[in-house]
Every structure is written in structure tokens, then in C-alpha cells.
Amino acid sequence: MNAPVKNPVRLRVAVHKFSSCDGCQLALLNLGEDLLTLAGRIDLVHFAEAGPLDPDTDVDVAFVEGSVSTPEDLERIQHIRQHSRLLIAIGACATAGGIQALRNGAKGAEWVAQIYSHPEAIASLERSTPISSHVKVDFELWGCPVSGPQMLAVVNSLLLGVAPRDNADKVCTECKRQGYSCVMVTRGVPCMGPVTRASCGALCPSLGRDCYGCYGPAENANTDALAAQFASQGLTPQAIVRRFQSINSQAPVFLAAADKTRMSGHE
Amino acid sequence: MNEQKRTVAIHVPVLTRVEGEGALDLRIEDGQIKELRLRIFEPPRYFEKFLEGRSYTEIPDMVARICGICPVAYQVTAAQALERLFGVELDPWARDMRRAFYCGEWIQSHSLHIHLLAAPDFFGCDSVIELARIAPEEVRRGLRIQALGNELMDLFGARSVHPVGIRVGGFHGSPSLSRINEIREKLRAVLPEAEALIRWAASIAVPQDDQAFVSVAMQHPSNYAIERGLIGVSDGLRIEAEAFDAHFAEHHEPSSTALFSSYHGQPYLVGPLARLNLNHARLPEWVKTLLAENGLALPSRNLFHSLVARTVEILLALHEALRLLDDYRVPDSPWVPVTPRAGVATGCTEAPRGLLWHRYEMDGEGRVVNARIVPPTSQNQGRIEEDLRLSLLNFGLDHPDDALRLHCEKVIRNYDPCISCATHFLRMNVERT
Amino acid sequence: MNASHAIDAGPPHTASVVARSQESPTIFTLQLRLDDAAAQAAYRFAPGQFNMLYLYGVGEVPISIMSDPEERDGISHTIRAVGRVTQGLAALKPGDRVGLRGPFGRGWPLQEMGGRDVVLVTGGLGCAPAVSVIHYVLRRRERFGKLVIIQGVKHADDLIWREQYDRWAKLPDTQVLVAADEGAALWPWHVGRVTELFGLARFNPARAVAMMCGPEGMMRVTAEHLLTRGLPESSLYLSMERNMQCAVGRCGHCQFGGAFVCRDGPVFNWGEVKALLAHRGF
Ligand SMILES: Cc1cc2nc3c(=O)[nH]c(=O)nc-3n(C[C@H](O)[C@H](O)[C@H](O)COP(=O)(O)OP(=O)(O)OC[C@H]3O[C@@H](n4cnc5c(N)ncnc54)[C@H](O)[C@@H]3O)c2cc1C
Ligand code: SF4
Ligand code: SF4
Ligand code: SF4
């Protein structure tokens, strides 16, 4: 991010929703009593799910949840960009197209026809795409969903006029710090932790299960090595593809890993 | 006003404080409602299609993403449907904890709806933040109860939005006794607050409305149905989840991206009020007394009682969670092994917003061949339209557009519609000729 | 390290900003008080030790404690805004909160100073951790020999606490030598390298103890000078700075040879580190 807001009098904040499950906005709505404290420090100008509705006023920060997936979305995201000093994409939908981007490889029109009896009435783009495919995004907060602490950290950084911190480390580092025993090493469970971006606090390994990559790719993710590891653990090429093609299927690193597996594995 | 001859089309943003986007088209001619259509613009997310080919092990994590507010409902329904097909007998521990986990979601979702979405209406406020200025104690109490619901979900799922704890066959992990004891203390401490919440909700003046409608909710012989039971209808029908298709049908209206459901061709209600209407006999005596004291007679024909119904379910869920966590023991294994088999997996549970029905056709390797998911909101859609029509007539069409709009909003919010596959701005177009 | 009072590896304690003053365009001082009154009353530190200051969601940084160790109702830090966290700290106002862990590390060898001449050579903000030593000495003036304060800055405008230096310069048995690489109008002190002032310093090398804090290059040159004047190696101390994360010797970020700067330092005896300091950039 390159233009942090310098000590604004009061941060004017908007929360916008695109194609999503609403789960990322809940990072704010589930803050409990802290929500009122937060409301005391920022002006929530637009946040339809919480009440305030004013998508046209200029704001300091716009948090955008969800992916672009309808023709109307294309215009709306431009409008939001024009009225926001900083635009922050929150969650897998907004940073990678979300789980609904699993349709990108498929024939959208066919699917519509199979579900709806009036397919002509369904306005939907062929592909579900991240916000950064359409406008300049100042900061991306990964995760499905993003957590309350992640959101508060961003807001607090902006209130202090500094750039939010991007934690692109791997889930494994958090797993080690918490002292969880590795499910891949101790129980042979294929885990996405080695290529997945940190910040959840290694929730899945805390329950003794594998990470399934909901925070998207970490920096310098060695997907080749992980795919080889998965294969040595007995995963079929199809199963390996499914590991990379899930919540963050359109993240370039995971997309490439899946393609490579498909090509080498004769799926 | 109804004498006007020109056509007025007003675009007003309506549905804030619902999850999603929709619009209402209202056409009034000579004082009569000529057209009333609720349009839901939900950019379709095609869950049912991309589940195809996925392994049963992935389903709970994937279907959670349908809704951030009730992921547990989706996870539990899917897991149970598959367990039934695979012939898995859950450990009694896991059965109990599934219900406790689900209670957490009811508590969280209901408190969120009451305080953040619905109550501001009744106090003339725009948002919970405004409401907190005039009713700070009540709002804080609500946020505390909501937080406790989240905590209960954290306990089993490590987080409350898209929890990661459920697997087909049970849970991935089990909470320690010390964490259970901690949460039991908190649950016990909040009970009086939940009772006060019921009294507060009952004291909020709501419009008097009286409508005949069909209620649909699950029923269980020995408890208040949440995650197990038969599908019951207020006309006396009792069916297994498998028989859903024989009585309920989904159809697509061009105006909406959610499918409409009907029961024998008519709209019906699912959700807290439908549940209370069908299961009030199962309520503990003291809850019945509490309701009688607060003037709520069941079954109720006034949808505005949904708010109180949610508060009652919060109290029930708190008690239920406490009961289930009594004598907690850490299980030898939180899950049992599963062997997939081909066939059709069907199941339903009571999501916070009402009946949720899943059907998966599975192949022999445990992969999805075909999936169908009927969420509560699409079931309520027909009922919402019908309700709007009736309650607008009851309210009076002569009111200015703004008042009509506000009334419609209130009506729609009773259903807590989760159109989360949608984007925002429900616009209301009123046309009067 | 005053172990009994240390708030160590656990979560930070909250502290409120009691006062804030701007010392130069980029340097500011925060006076903090722990929100827990009992913890504040029990807080003890030795000059030369540091705290970890935490800004929620922004990050945590090591900062030396510059207040007087005798002061009970506040803890002061003088900070230069150089990056994310320190810029965030710069935005704080009285009433705002920070997280605080500490004190950490090994401070200056006060127990060895009794009866000896005390020579402090600092560069830039290196003066911050030395100020608490000055306060310590001035409070117990009779217990020490000469006090020599040498401070170098890049530009005259970088010198903070000018009045204090003026005041100290007037005290008996106290010598203040200040230099700026670049001077300015009305700059009363030396213009040029601080090393050029060494010849003016009056102390008895045989009974002096010297402490250095500043850029490593400056400290190397200073050490060479002091050693040539006959100061024994064992009387020469320096405070080191390294990137730190945990401050309790676990993460390894501040590892310096076989030592951890956070735990074994930041103050080292010259003998302990001279070999490594000979390698530039180590
Ligand atoms: C034991 C110890 C005591 C310290 N005491 C103090 C003190 O009393 N007052 C004080 O202001 N600082 C002190 N520091 C230095 C302080 O910790 C760092 O300035 C701080 O960590 C920088 O963090 P940041 O997030 O603001 O900058 P970052 O974002 O991490 O860095 C931003 C930029 O500044 C540069 N930078 C980082 N540190 C410094 C530095 N020290 N000097 C110049 N450039 C730097 C980086 O290389 C980078 O280019 C001390 C350090 C240690 C180890
Ligand atoms: S990223 Fe995940 S949690 Fe967030 S809105 Fe999208 S599906 Fe929901
Ligand atoms: S369990 Fe997963 S996240 Fe944890 S260390 Fe092992 S591979 Fe990494
Ligand atoms: S461990 Fe992986 S899948 Fe689990 S919550 Fe964290 S990032 Fe998501």
C-alpha cells in the first residue's frame, strides 16, 4: 500500500458486499461489545448489513467483500473505487474470486440452465473474479473468512497512519509457534499448511486436522514439493488438484499448481 | 393519494440489515395491490454444481461457505445426511456435541438478528450503533449473548464463521474439560440476562397482524427439534426427510435467483415462529409460564412475534447447551471411521432461519454425483410475498410511500432473510395509478 | 535484569500515554504509565535496559528506557520515527494505549562504576539509553569521579535535549563535549566528527569506566581511541542494537555470535564482542 491516511480526524469507512457468503463482514458484526468501541473511533458511512446506507459519499477506506460476478458488479466496483481513498479487499472472494470461482473452468451457461427454469433472467458473468482484476486494490486481507483481529489490526494501523502489515508467512510457522504436533509428519495427513498464508493461528492443526488452504497461498509457496509430498502419501492426481482447487482456486499459485498436476498426472 | 392517475415509480433503498440484496416491486392501482414481487438478485454461486465430483470429506468445509451466518447448519445437515447413507453410528458424545455446537449457532444468529438487524426498526433507528445510544444496556447484553454463541461454536470448530471442527463421522477434535467448565460458568451466568431479553422483546410494541399460514418445522418426540426429527406441517403431516420431494416443490420465478418453494402448491413459513407454533407443547413448563406472563399465546398468527420467538429460542438453546455439557467427558475418539457407499444421502435440520434440506447422490468412492440444497430463505420467499400483501392491506395502502416502505422492511425482516448469495440495495419501486 | 519485576514473555501489559513531547522533527518522547497501578508501582529497571512497545495490529519494537530509574509513576521512551511501528508510536496522543513488556536485557554495569570516572560516548539517539545513566550519576554525585558526556549528531538540528546538555556542562566535575557533522547558526558546539573531540576529554584512564551507544562504526573508532589512551578492555562497555522479535532469547533474530542481544545484552563488555565487531556488517 502506498497512500496511508495521515492522521485523519475520523476515519470514514464503508463496507461493501459483492458475491459472497457475508462471512467476512461478520468479522465486524461478531466483535461483540468491541463493535461499539470501534464505532466510537470510526465513522461507518456505508455498511448495508449493519444499517448505514450511503454508497455514494467519499470515504477514506472501503472494505470490499465478495467477488465480481455480475454485469452490475462491474460498474459498482468502479464507482466504489472512485469514491474511496483506500480500497481494501477482504476475504478469499475478494482476493481470489472465492469458492464460487470454481465455476470459472466450467460452462456457466449450462449450469444456469440446469438449475434455473428461466436462465435468461439470470445475469451472471462467466467467471467470478477478484476485485484486483477490475480496479486498483491498495491492500488485500486474505482468509475465508478474515478474522476480527485481522480487521481490527488493519483499522488500527490506518488510524495511526501507517500501512497495515501483510503476513504472507506460512501456516506451518504459526503451527510451530503454537507447539501443535504436525499432522502431516506424525499422522500422514496431507496438509496444505506448507503453502498456505498465515494469520488464522493454525486453527485446523489445533484440532488435529489438515489445513485446507482457506487463507490462500503464502509467499514463496513451494507447491511442487507439496504436490510431490501429497503424491507420496497416496493422493491421486485428481485429489491433489482438488486440494489446490477449493476455496482459493483462482489464486494464481494454486491455479498453476493444479494445472501442473493435471498435466503431469494425466488426470 | 390513491386517486392519483399518474404512475409514480420510486426507487428507495429498502433492505438494509438483511444479508444480501433484493428489491420489491409494488404496483398499486385504484387502491388495490395489482402487483407485488420480491426480487432477489443473488448472483448465483452454483454450489450444487461445483460440489459434483468432490469427496464426502470435503463437503462440510465447502457447504459452510453458502452462508457465513449459519455455516454450522450446512455442515451438520450435510454430515448427517452422509452419515445416514454410509450407515455410520455416531458416538453418543458426538451426537450430543453436534447439538451443543448447533445451539451456539442459534444463539449467535438469533442475537445478531434481534439486535443488529431487527430491533433498530422498532426504535426508529438506522443501526445498532444508533440503537446503542438509546438502549445501551440492552444492546450490550445482546452483543454479549451473541459473543457467547460464537464462543460455543469456537469450542468445537475453532472459529465461528466456517468452523473447521466437523467431519463426517463426528468431530476432528474435542475440547478439554477445563474449557467446557469455563463456558458452562458463562452459560449459567447469562441465563437471567436471556430471560430479561425475552421480557424486553415482548415489551416492544409490534403491529397487530393476524394471518392464516402453514407452518413447517421439524418435530422430535422428546425434545425441541434442532438437528434431528421429522418434518412436521401445521396441518398434521409428519414425514421423513426423504419424502420432502413428494410434498414440497421448488420452482424458479424469473424475478429471482433464489428458487421458490411451495407445500402442496401453497406458500409456507419456516423459522423460529413456525418452530414454536409446532413445538410449543415441548417447551418446559417454566418457559410456557414466562411466555404467558409476557402475553405470547401459541400458536401465533402474527409474524411480528418472530422477534420474541427468537428470544425464546435463545433461552432454550442456552439451557440445552448447559444440559448437554453437564457431565462432559473427553471421548476416546471424537470421530468414528467412515466407509463411503453409493446411494442417495438426504437430511434436514433446523437452521436458525428454518428448515434446511440437503440431498446428495453419491458414487461408490464417496464422491458427489449430484447435489440439491433447499435453504430456508427460498422456502420463505412465497410466504414473504403473501405476508407483504396481507399486512400491507391491513396497514392501509393510503400511507405515504416512505411509511409503506418502512412497513415492508419490517415485514421482510421478520423472516431474517438470508439472501447472502446476493449483493445489496433492495430497491422498492412503488407504482400508483 | 531485575527478574522479580520483569514482565517477560507473556502478553503485553497495557500502558497509557501520559505525556508526549516532540524533541525534533522525527524524535519524540512518550511518558507511559502501566494501567495496572500495582504493576506500575512494582516496575523497576536498570539504566540500559529496554522495553518492548506494542501497537495493536501494527507491531512491537525494542526501545530503551530513558527515564530516571528512581521515578515511580512513569516510564519514558525517546523514539525516532523510522518505520512502521515507530511512525505509529509517533501518532499517539496522551490517553492512547500501547502494550508494554519489559524491562529486558542487561543494563549498564552500575555496580562497577562506584568511585570511578564515568565516560559516556553516544551518537544520535544512542544518547537515550545513556541519559538514565547520567541521571543516576547526578543523583549520587559524590559516589563518582569525573563525568564526561560526549555526544555526536549528524546535523545540529538532530541534537535533542539541548538545555539539558547546557545545564550539565555547568556542573562541577562534569564535562560535556558535543559535535555535529553539520553545524547551524548559533551552534555553540563543535562542528565536525565527534571523534575529533576525544583529545579534549579529561579523565583518568586507569580508573575510568566508559560506555558507548550509537552507530557501530562510531563505537569502533571510540573504542580504539580509549584503548590507546590506556583504558583497560574490561572497563569498556557498549550497547548493541539488533532487530528483535521476542526479546527473551527464543526467536534468534538478534543473535550476535553466541549471544542474544536481547538477553545477554544489549550492554556488552568490549572483550565479549570485539572479535565480532571487527567484522563489519556482522
Ligand atoms: C535494544 C534496543 C534498544 C533500542 N532503543 C531505541 C530507542 O531508545 N529509541 C529509538 O528510537 N529506537 C531504539 N531502537 C531501535 C528501534 O527498535 C527501531 O528503530 C525500530 O525497531 C524500528 O521499527 P519500525 O517498525 O519503526 O521500522 P521498520 O519498518 O522495521 O524499519 C523502517 C526502516 O527504518 C530502518 N531502520 C530500522 N531500524 C532503524 C534504526 N534503529 N535506525 C535507523 N534506521 C532504522 C529500516 O532499515 C527500514 O529501512 C532500539 C533497538 C534495540 C535493539
Ligand atoms: S471469503 Fe469466505 S467467508 Fe469471506 S465472504 Fe467469501 S466465502 Fe464468505
Ligand atoms: S500440521 Fe500442517 S501446518 Fe502444521 S506444521 Fe504440519 S504441515 Fe505445517
Ligand atoms: S489451518 Fe488452513 S484451512 Fe484451517 S483455518 Fe487456517 S488457513 Fe484455513
Image (cartoon, coloured by chain):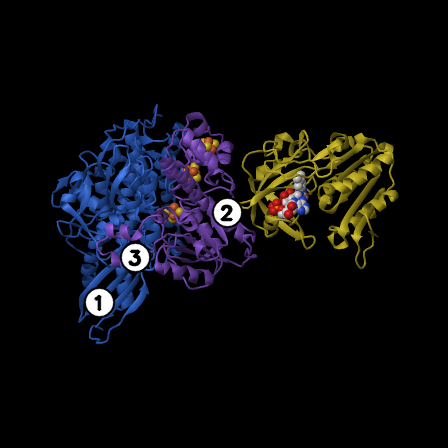
Question: Residue C9: image x %, image y %?
Answer: 57, 33
Q: Amino acid at mark 1?
A: Arg
Q: Is A141 on the left-hand or right-hand side of C205?
A: left
Q: Amino acid at mark 3?
A: Phe
Number of marks in the image?
3
User: Are discs 2 and 1 located on one and the same chain?
Assistant: no
Residue B303 visible in this rendered orientation of the protein: yes
Label 3 Cα crowd, 10 Å radius (few <14 / some 14-19 / many 20+): many
Name the residue carrying label 2.
A153
Q: Which chain is yellow?
A: C
User: Are discs 1 and 3 located on one and the same chain?
Assistant: yes
Name the residue carrying label 3.
B41
Residue at the (47%, 37%) spot, across then down: A224
Name the residue carrying label 1.
B27
Which of the pair C276/C139 is nearer the observer? C276
Chain that bears disc 3: B
Question: Residue A240: image x %, image y %?
Answer: 39, 36
Q: Quadrant of the N terminus of chain B?
A: bottom left
> How much space separates mark 2 and mark 1, taking CA atoms?
48 Å
> How much space separates mark 3 and mark 2, taking CA atoms?
33 Å
Q: Residue furthest bottom?
A: B5
Q: Which chain is purple?
A: A
> Which quadrant would residue B14 be assigned to in this image?
bottom left
Q: Find numbered disc 3 in the image and state the secondary structure of the residue it sits on.
A: loop
